[in-house]
Image (cartoon, helix red, strand yellow):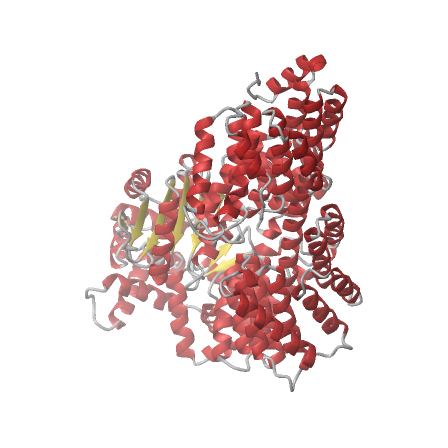
Amino acid sequence: MLAAIGERLSNAEIAAKLYISVRTVESHVSSLLRKFGAANRWELVDRARDMPVTIGLAGIPAGWTSFIGRDRERDVIRDAITGTRLVTLAGPGGVGKTRLAAVVAAHAASWFPSAVAFVDLVPVGDGFVAEAVAAALGVAEHPQQRLESVIAGRIGRGRALLILDNCEHLLAPVAGFAARLLSECPNVRVLATSRERLGIPGERLVTIEPLPASDAVALFLDRAKQVDPGFDTDPAIIAGLCARLDGLPLAIELAAARASGLGAEGLTAAIDDHLRLLTGGRGPDRRHQSLRAVLEWSHGLLDDEARLLFRRLAVFAGSFDLAAVTAVTTGQRPAIADGLGRLADKSLVIHERPAGRWRLLDTIRAFAADRLDASGERDAIQDRHLRWAAATATQLETKLSRAPGDDWRSEFDATAGDLREALSTAQRRHGAVNAHQFARSLGRLAFARRFLQEATDHFRRAAELAPTATDAVQDLLSVADCTFVSTTSGPDTFQLQLAAAQRADPAQDSNARAIALARAVATAGRYQVVRHPGPEATSEQARRCLGEASATGDHNDPAMAAALAIASAWSASHDLTLAQTAVAAARTTGDPVLTSAALDAVSDSQRRAGRLRQAMKVTQQRLDLLPAMDHDDPRALAEIEDILITACTDALHTGDLPTALSVAGQLSADHLLGGGSYIAASMQVPALILSGDLEAGLRQATWMWDRWQQAGRSPSGWVIPAMAMAALAHQLRGDQDAQATWRTRVLQIVGATGPGRERMLAPLVFLDVRAAIHTRNTTAAATLVTHAFGDFPVAWAQPYARAAGAELAVVAELPDAAERLTAAASTADQNRWAAACLARAAGRLHHDPAELTAAADEWERIGARLERAYTLQLLADRAAEGRSELTTLGLPLPP
């Protein structure tokens, strides 16, 4: 249960995953809260991060028959995966690589406590290897973090085994994926099966040969007796038959399924007849020919109805259920069910009983595909497959809309290979389905599954297939929204919105271009696009776009009027009146996303005017809109992400640490946001450390650092303040080495020179001032105080630094200490933490126990345990209590 909470699943999703009721989940969550003494669910998420990641056995196909022989190979492979990072089982089709890998994986589970995951790549197309692995592991993409990095973060902390089965059609992408995973995860092993090696340095190749005579005979007898328990014949005849089949397990199983009635001698004669029919005799490709012979023979013994069903199944890329087969093969459901059963009895189809699905082995599927091509009905069946795939995508989208908490993801994961392949086919076969709507549906499904890059690609494809320019604009705006969610890049989003506007046709829809332009203008203002290189050009471009949108858009249309009002508010110089006008216009539409964007303009104006508490009240109105927003709509999720980040920042602005922790926890724990990103963690670190929970803050900082490294050290203004706060936490704990490590990281990231360096280093000023107060090292106090009262572009840090600077002036007995207290009050009146700090500083200056007591009470109210403890230490009549609390916090006692 704790692991599921750590995956940021909702109670409904945990219930679906563990096959229990939501009420049972709620009971377990309550028990965990009591057990760990946790205040809320987000603390349980934090606890789960400290546990070894345990995925268990994921995706290993259940053995539908007993496993015969291969003792030597099993030993070789087990030894290989303990000593080699990448092991590839290579051999011809039908030699039993998949089954052998599955058996070894199940037996080796105890060696890999974090995860043993089996990924069937047969239905996977080029470019979707990471998605297939993610589906097996149950992970999703995170903002500013590639899916491969999320996978590495999921399994990379413990010993894990990943089996990549049937790699031969994806050698290059599988090799690239495996190489990256192995480089990032030193405790992970990869076991691949393929008809040829992957070609990665360090790869160990284990060639899987046909079965030796004794194992081949044992396999034949076992399978034949499943069909006819009374089957018995001369072992020498069976050995001869198995030799004719080259010891290939698949060929032997297919032949054994026909043992009843014919006997081994009859089987031998039948196989010989078919071998003689193959061109080329028994040449170098003899193993392929023996398998082909038994397939030809088995297929020839089917009746017409079974042969029809068998070849039509070849159109499926992956597994399929009865409903899918019924839709594609044109038969009646009872007859199809009976036909699947008969094909399974003859080992031509595999029945995955727990899942209620069937599949063809890759080798058999290739043979069935040849039969389908020879029949001349490939196009007709492929069209039916397309219609089924498009209908399935629509049904899944409907399920998602009606019950987003249901486990629709498993159905999507099971059919994703077919849906992706069908979409590619739909582009080539015009008219079979509405390819545009199909691409749009897949875009939304992939986004809801949090395959962000895949969603972006599908929406781009939808724009290419769009029947009208208006549809294309809508799809390209979805591309822009997906990009913002995955990268939080304002400039990229701005350019994509402009590209969407370019696709519009004013003759069709005058508002489509105007709305896209208005959204681009709002993006430019909200996300500081004009501050990036070339700000003058970008700002002028935004002004031109706003003018055109206003001139061409229908002002009588509520959505158009709201978009223009929001764009006007964000393009102005923080004009509160324009922002309030935008809110009024947005509320007439009933669209929570538009309303939130307008409210953000109001809070931005309040914030820049220094009215931080008023800004927080407006942001609270945005938080109240969250339940009305669709987390699976790219446009809405981009807004949701902004709401949570802004709310956390505003709470830090105002010193409201409980709210900052609550919202940061929601940002981190909400799996719909891909909350495992380093951005979410970076928002929690300052609130935790300012609250005095140094241990949790440092855990989050370490986790953030690791994820940021895995994400390629993307430029981010969020991580530097969090790193500086981590350095402060170590300073407060008396760990100078660790403090220096974090400080060095900040300096290395910022660099020695360059624009914005002082802004980026501003969080270190707060660190230095607080450290000086804690250690009572006032040697550089005057300089530090001067820095603390400098301009802080990291806005939320300014009241903290100034209040701490004023207190340091008091501690150091600087002559201007009283003046510093007065100067800091101008920013502290909007920040509870800063106000409490100044109250304590005033008590120290005046030697007034009443002021110190009031400060201690305020620290208690805002949840700053560490600051309260220090304040109590200053009270002579409560020194013992203060020192006791410091000891409880595990902190060094001050002099």
Q: Residue furthest bottom?
A: 507
Residue 668 versus residue 248: which sits nearer the camera?
668
Q: Is residue 306 visible?
A: no
Q: Is residue 664 placed above or below 550 in the rendered structure?
A: above
Q: Is residue 26 left or right of residue 150?
A: right
Q: Is residue 89 placed above or below 386 in the rendered structure?
A: above
Q: Quadrant of residue 301?
A: bottom left
Residue 229: percent from left, percent from top = 43, 49
Q: Quadrant of residue 252?
A: bottom left
Taking the spot 62% from the left edge, 42% from the top edge, the residue there is: 798
Residue 377 versus residue 684: which sits nearer the camera?
684
Q: Is residue 182 visible?
A: yes
Taking the spot 39% from the left edge, 59% from the top edge, the residue there is: 258
Q: How many marks?
A: 0
Taking the spot 39% from the left edge, 61% from the top edge, the residue there is: 362
Quadrant for the C terminus, please.
top right
Q: Is residue 461 placed above or below 650 in the rendered structure?
A: below
Quadrant for the N terminus, please.
top right
Residue 486: percent from left, percent from top = 54, 57
Q: Quadrant of residue 564?
A: bottom right
Residue 820 versus residue 524: which sits nearer the camera?
820
Q: Is residue 513 placed above or below 62 in the rendered structure?
A: below
Residue 417: percent from left, percent from top = 49, 63
Q: Residue furthest left?
A: 283
Residue 691: percent from left, percent from top = 64, 32
